[in-house]
Image (cartoon, rainbow, N blue to C red):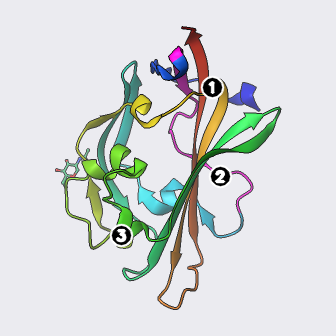
């Protein structure tokens, strides 16, 4: 399967964790992939956001993000949204969990928490006020500043070389705690290579 992945862009991200330098190659043209083997009712990034006014470009500094997205997920304003992020490592053909895993049981409350990864790479750059709308208001635009994501700033500790993916899931629950019929799942795939030993 790895061979099918076309390396469309190379990010030369220099990480000094463990005294070595690494290069990260993001393997999907659109950055966000659908989740494999997802259960019925699972939508990908396009079920969460209309991405037609959104664009990314990659160079040696990182990923430059620009444009806007529009909420499309069919949930209600008062729903509680959970977010889980899991980093997986490809070990002899099988995706294995790593210690990197995050869960927010109320993403709308946590979306502007300054020490969270989603704040660092996303919500701090939203220029319109969506505090009360969160992701729960289909048709609402999320207006983004143009910004650069340097992945190295979000990586702490030594990195094992190889294939990784971040699996991201949003779920919505009504006020009785019943889950809405659709959930969102998407993945970001990347490969880490050590380019220089200390
Ligand atoms: C994003 O939305 C703002 C406000 O509606 C608009 O002025 C701007 O042109 C949009 N950007 C893109 C890339 O569509």
Residue at mark 2 to residue at mark 3: CA–CA distance: 26 Å
Vertical position of residue 138 compared to residue 180: above or below: above
Residue at mark 3 to residue at mark 1: CA–CA distance: 38 Å
Crowding at dot 3, Cα within 10 Å, few <14 / some 14-19 / many 20+, comes out as: some
The answer to whether residue 74 shows anywhere in this view is: no
Confirm or reject: label 2 Cβ below 8 Å from ligand 1: no
User: Which quarter shows the N terminus?
Assistant: top right
Crowding at dot 1, Cα within 10 Å, few <14 / some 14-19 / many 20+, comes out as: few
Secondary structure category for the residue under label 1: loop
Q: Which residue is mark 3?
A: 109
Magenta stretch holds residue 56? no
Name the front one of labels 3 and 1: 3
In-image side of 61 versus 93 (left or right): left
Q: Which residue is mark 1?
A: 6
In-image side of 126 versus 89 (left or right): left
Mark on residue 35? Answer: 2
User: Which quarter shows the C terminus?
Assistant: top right
Name the front one of labels 2 and 1: 2
Secondary structure category for the residue under label 3: helix
Q: What residue is drawn where x is 37% and y is 43%?
A: 121
Name the front one of labels 2 and 3: 3
Residue 12 drawn at (x, y percent): 46, 17
Which badge, 3 or 1, comes first in the chain's sequence?
1
Q: Which residues are magenta?
A: 19-38
Contact? badges 2 and 1 (CB < 8 Å)? no
Magenta stretch holds residue 30? yes
Secondary structure category for the residue under label 2: loop
Residue 31 drawn at (x, y percent): 51, 39
């Amino acid at each position: 399967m790895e061979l099918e992945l076309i390396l469309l862009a190379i990010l030369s991200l220099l990480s000094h964790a463990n005294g070595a330098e690494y290069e990260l190659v993001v393997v999907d043209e659109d950055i966000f992939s659908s989740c494999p083997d997802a259960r019925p009712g699972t939508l990908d990034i396009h079920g969460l956001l209309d991405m037609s006014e959104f664009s990314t470009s990659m160079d040696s500094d990182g990923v430059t993000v620009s444009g806007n997205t529009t909420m499309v997920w069919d949930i209600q304003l008062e729903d509680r949204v959970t977010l889980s992020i899991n980093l997986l490592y490809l070990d002899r053909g099988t995706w294995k969990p790593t210690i990197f895993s995050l869960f927010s049981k109320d993403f709308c409350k946590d979306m502007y928490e300054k020490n969270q990864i989603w704040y660092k790479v996303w919500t701090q750059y939203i220029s319109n006020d969506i505090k009360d709308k969160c992701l729960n208001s289909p048709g609402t635009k999320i207006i983004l500043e143009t910004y650069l994501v340097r992945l190295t700033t979000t990586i702490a500790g030594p990195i094992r070389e190889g294939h990784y993916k971040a699996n991201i899931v949003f779920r919505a629950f009504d006020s009785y705690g019943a889950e809405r019929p659709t959930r969102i799942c998407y993945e970001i795939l990347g490969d880490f290579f050590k380019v220089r030993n200390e």
